Image (tube, helix red, strand yellow):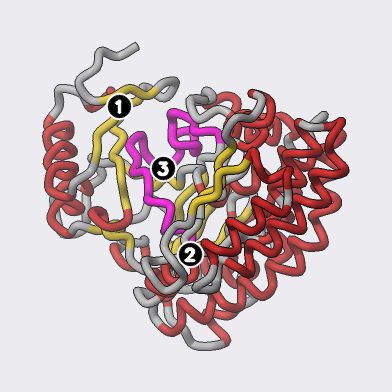
Amino acid sequence: MKIEFKNAPPEVKAAAEAFDTDKSGTLDESEVLVAQAVAAEALADKANAFATEGGKALKSLLAASRSEKAEEAIEKLTQDVPALSMLEIRMGPKVGKGKGKADQIAADRERLTTGQRRVLEVSQSKAEPLAETARPLLLERFTRLGFTEAQMKRTLKYLRDEAPVTITFAPDKQTPGGGTLAQAMTKGGAYFSTWESGITGSHSVQPGGQRQVWEGKVYQDIFQNENLGDQARPKYTALNGTRSPNSGTNGSFGKCYFIARNGVKNRATIIPDDIPFVGPEKLGTFDHLEHVLMGIGQDTYLQNLVKASEDPTVELPSGANRWQEVHIFGPLDLAKDCATLVIHNSYAGTTHEADLRSLAERHGLDVRWTDGNKTWTDGEAAP
């Protein structure tokens, strides 16, 4: 369903842009109340009438969208509620046609092992009440920083639906089988965890090593207690919430990176910092993020997240950024799960550039470049 504003003042349209109401058949709870939010933000003198009537009407519309009589219901609603005359309401695919969010999540999780699904189910069940408890505290923090509740909701939605997840790597790293990591990924077509590949620069990634201890703490020993095995463990990636040109990890794990497709968030958990410094009370999912954001100590970073959520062109420099660790469960297929390969310009003109271009071409990835401070499209001159 798509709800658009027509013949409305510019401030109403601007407020409406804070909401994504393009759904396949249903609206979620926050979007059902879009009329109330727009009224409060942009129609102060008419807020009471519009919020009351518009909110009730859109709640009815939610139920109507699940029936065969939706078109008729919409027509009646727009006649009965004058405030809705500024809305243009068009039906998208009916429920059951196409893939809604629930279908996409189910399809993503079909790619997981039973053990990985178990970890995500447990993580989700624990994250939900933690996020609920943190929500008023997060709103208090956003308010103290001068932001509105609508901006907080928009930021959470941006992190869930738009903010890039990046997978950083060193293309010239040597693999146990010979050749470089870029060459191995070109051939294998996937990104593997250190448990799967045996490629690591850390002594923590070994049986009985610190990585198992850290994961045991955050996931409360589910891998050990339920005998899930190391192959069930996640792949470590990052949420680049401010779209930093250096992938959001300050080059800590390599200068090149993939930008993943948003669907990987359906089978991921997230924590506010590196895993050694985080406990189970900060483990979240992309549907339950409030306590994760509360775990970020820097107000400046939260302010930058709001900027990024409101301006899709923002690329904050590395000095202004930090990252949240994202743990993706299941396969990371380059063609299926990644959209873009970002190459650091220090590899320009080397054999590694040729390898990276072969990787991108073989797996259908767009190519961008970075110097750590800015990114640019392949073929453009460096800024």
Residue where numbered disc 3 is placed: 253
Q: Position of residue 59 (x, y in %)?
A: 71, 62
Which circle's residue, 2 or 1, is located before the other in the chain? 2
Q: Mark yes or no: residue 76 visible.
A: yes
Residue where numbered disc 2 is placed: 101
- Badge 3 marks a residue whose secondary structure is loop
Q: Which residues are magenta?
A: 242-267
Distance between the alpha carbons at the discs numbered 3 and 2: 32 Å
Residue type for callout 3 = Phe
Between tags 3 and 2, which lies in front?
2
Q: Is residue 255 magenta?
A: yes
Residue type for callout 1 = Trp
What numbered label is drawn on residue 369? 1
Q: Mark yes or no: residue 231 visible.
A: no
Residues tagged 3 and 2 counted as in contact (Cβ below 8 A):
no
Crowd around label 3: few <14 · some 14–19 · many ≥20 (10 Å):
some
Looking at the image, residue 111 sits to the left or right of residue 267; the answer is left
